[in-house]
Amino acid sequence: MRPSTRLLAPGFIGRSLDEVKRFAKMVITHENIRIPMTPYHLLDFTNPDTITMCKTMSDRDIGGFSRVALDQVLATPSEPAHIRFHGNISIDLPPDRPQVHRSGYAAWRNRDRGPTIFGKSLWDVSPYLFLALRVKSDGRKYFVNVQTESVEYTDIHQHRLYAQRPGEWETLLISWADFVRTNYGQVVEPQNEMLTQRVRTLGIGLTDRVPGPFDLCVSGMWATNRMEDGDTHRKES
């Protein structure tokens, strides 16, 4: 049997090599049998290729008028390379779609990643306690969104992004255990434990429905067991 052209594509080979390197490092450092203390980088936006893995969403998908953009920003002496999630929230309803009763949201997330020789590309963050984010916020009410290979494909686990120093760079830690299971924006029961062994996507959304501009910068998201990685650790959900 010959492998398909798609499986031999450079992206497939590169992802597979990255997984082999990661597994080899775990064996060499014995992190497969003890608590890992090195960070597990999930989305590193100092790499300009990472933004190509991401997509934006907004109420424009249902006829709304919010604007959203995701731009790569190069490093400067005072700032790391990062992505800028920005735009303008509008709560105006589309006049030609009477079935739409709510508007005013914007979000981004990584696209589902392609397969590797090990199968579907998923992140296993189960050995780690926290999700770390390096951000510069405008102080608006953002939520971090996590999708896993759950029974309900549309489930999203969410946690508020509690920025403490709007307008400044800071590293925030969120316990994986503190994420809340939601579906179409509503908290659902039972609150099953997140499948941290099978994380599909990470992203950030703005759903406060407050009209006006928004601007959030993110340089990276990673899994960690080190409390000292963060400037701030908040447990509120």
Image (cartoon, rainbow, N blue to C red):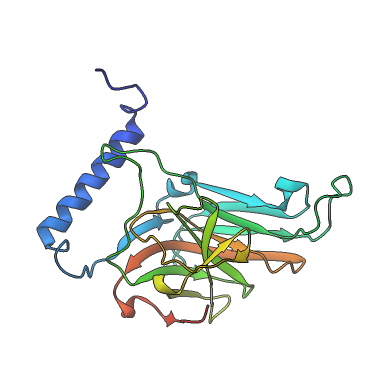
Quadrant the N terminus occupies: top left
Residue 8 picture location, percent across and down: 30, 26
Q: Viewer-proximal residue, 31 or 193?
A: 193
Residue 205 picture location, percent across and down: 59, 61
Residue 78 in view here: no
Above or below, 67 against 129 in this view is above
Residue 167 picture location, percent across and down: 58, 75
Where on the picture, by quarter, is residue 224? Answer: bottom left
Above or below, 113 against 180 in this view is above
Q: How many marks?
A: 0
Where on the picture, by quarter, is residue 197? Answer: bottom left
Above or below, 83 against 165 in this view is above
Furthest residue toward top = 1
Q: Viewer-proximal residue, 87 or 108?
A: 108
Q: Viewer-proximal residue, 92 or 152?
A: 152
Furthest residue toward front = 190
Residue 32 in view here: yes
Q: Which residue is drawn at 76% across and 66% down?
A: 212
Q: Which residue is drawn at 78% across and 47% down?
A: 63
Q: Viewer-proximal residue, 97 or 108?
A: 97
Q: Is residue 96 left or right of residue 225?
A: right
Q: Is residue 17 left or right of residue 79?
A: left
